[in-house]
Image (cartoon, rainbow, N blue to C red):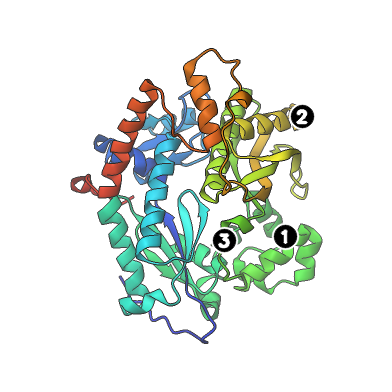
Amino acid sequence: MKKLNFTKKSNSEKIIFLIDFDAFFASCHIIENPSYKNKPLAVAYSEKYSIITAASYSARKFGVKAGLSAFKAIEICPELLLVKPNYSLYSKASKAVFKFFYENYSKRIELASIDECYMDVTNEYKKYGSVSKMAQHILNSVQENFNITCSIGISTNKILAKVACDRNKPNGYFRILPFEIENKLWPLHVGKMFGVGTKTALLLEKNNINTIGDLAKVDKNFLIDILNKPGLILWNRANGMDTDVLDINFSGLKSLGSEVTFNQPTQNLGEIEQFIYDMSFAVRERLLQRNLGAKTITVVLRYQEAKLTKKRVSMQQTLDKPIHTLEDIFAVSKNNFYKLWDGSLVRLVGVRASNTAKEYNVKHQLDLNKLDLKFSSVEKIVDGINEKLHQDKLLTGANLKIKLEEEEKVSKFQKGEFNDNKRRS
């Protein structure tokens, strides 16, 4: 790989990595079942009505990608293997890798999602001799210890590191510094800019803004006129301007969310509810990672017939106390959806948590009298106690067996015991 000659322009500039796990969900399933290696694999709930949530690189060669209907995916790739999502596996594997980064590379890490993080290596890179050597060391270590691959974007701020990360996937690194944007950033299609979706790209193209360079050179007031406030944000990003401050104090997070855009708009309520559940799970995991609860839950929709300039519609509910459990987040999100939905075809759905509070550092005293004991099963009572504890401390016999089996799988993942089945994802 070509060596990067990273020369800092000033002592105040930071060095930021954006580390993104390659085809992470699919990779987790391949580690769990090595027989899937080198086979086209996708994550989806069913063949009929589900949407692909992730695809291995072997599947992507056939055109299978996230957002495609499972039915269509099988049509274009008949040998495609469909596996159901296992968010518990993803979460535990993700936490293991993030912990590895924290203990071995840098304490200044911002978790961007379940499979990507920003890392400030301004001081740490020196012991590796160069920024490029540190990046390669991380790539090698992740593959050797976890049997997955990742890609790294390198810059002095977050947005340039984010864009750079996509330039040498999978299992590679790429650098874009502010003084390099004219050659490395501006020639890219405007849709490659983080924050520019399909419809925004079409709107920009209609106004002769086809590349990121066009976006950078256009009058920013014109962008504000057609895109409102996001226009200024995109103009700054196109000109290489963004923050280099990482959110390592998770309690300072104001809002977090997850969303999905469907390749084919849908009115299938079962499918939409399943995705609301999945996104509620993702939001819940990010709250737990940051030790937060959220008082406000918002559902966002974009309808198929919405015009290019029409904003997304949303419905939110603010509660008296912060919530953090999957059951609560999903219940509020689903309720918001049915209040908001007008029966139209849905192109995008999202779940967002805001008005967060770092309240779960305080130990919760268990009050058995306040537990909901209307459920007759032992399992429901156990769940109630665990919710109060904010972790699975009490288990039924059946759940203990499942937990032990899962921990064995994750332990193998952490120890790299599948190293004989290495792959590039």
- Whichever of callouts 1 and 3 sits on the residue coming sooner in the sequence is 1
Q: Residues within 10 Å of mark 1 (few under 14, many from 20)?
A: some
| Residue named by callout 3 | 249
| Circles 1 and 3: CB atoms closer than 8 Å | no
Q: State whether residue 388 is above or below residue 101.
A: above
Pointer 2 residue = 339
Side of 5 where 294 appears, left or right: right
The quarter in which the N terminus is drawn is bottom left
**Label 3 environment density (alpha carbons within 10 Å; few <14, some 14–19, many ≥20):** few
Residue contact between numbered discs 3 and 2, judged by CB atoms under 8 Å: no
- Which one is in front, 151 or 377? 377
- Secondary structure found at label 1: helix
Query: Where's residue 23, x and y in %?
Result: 40, 47
- The x, y position of residue 418, in whole percent, is 22, 44
Between 316 and 392, the residue placed more toward the observer is 392
In the image, what residue type sits under mark 1? Pro
Residue drawn at x 30%, y 48% as measured from the top left: 414
Q: Looking at the image, which is closer to me, 308 or 10?
A: 10
Q: What residue type is labelled 3?
A: Asn
Q: Residue furthest top?
A: 376
Q: Residue 230 carries which label?
A: 1
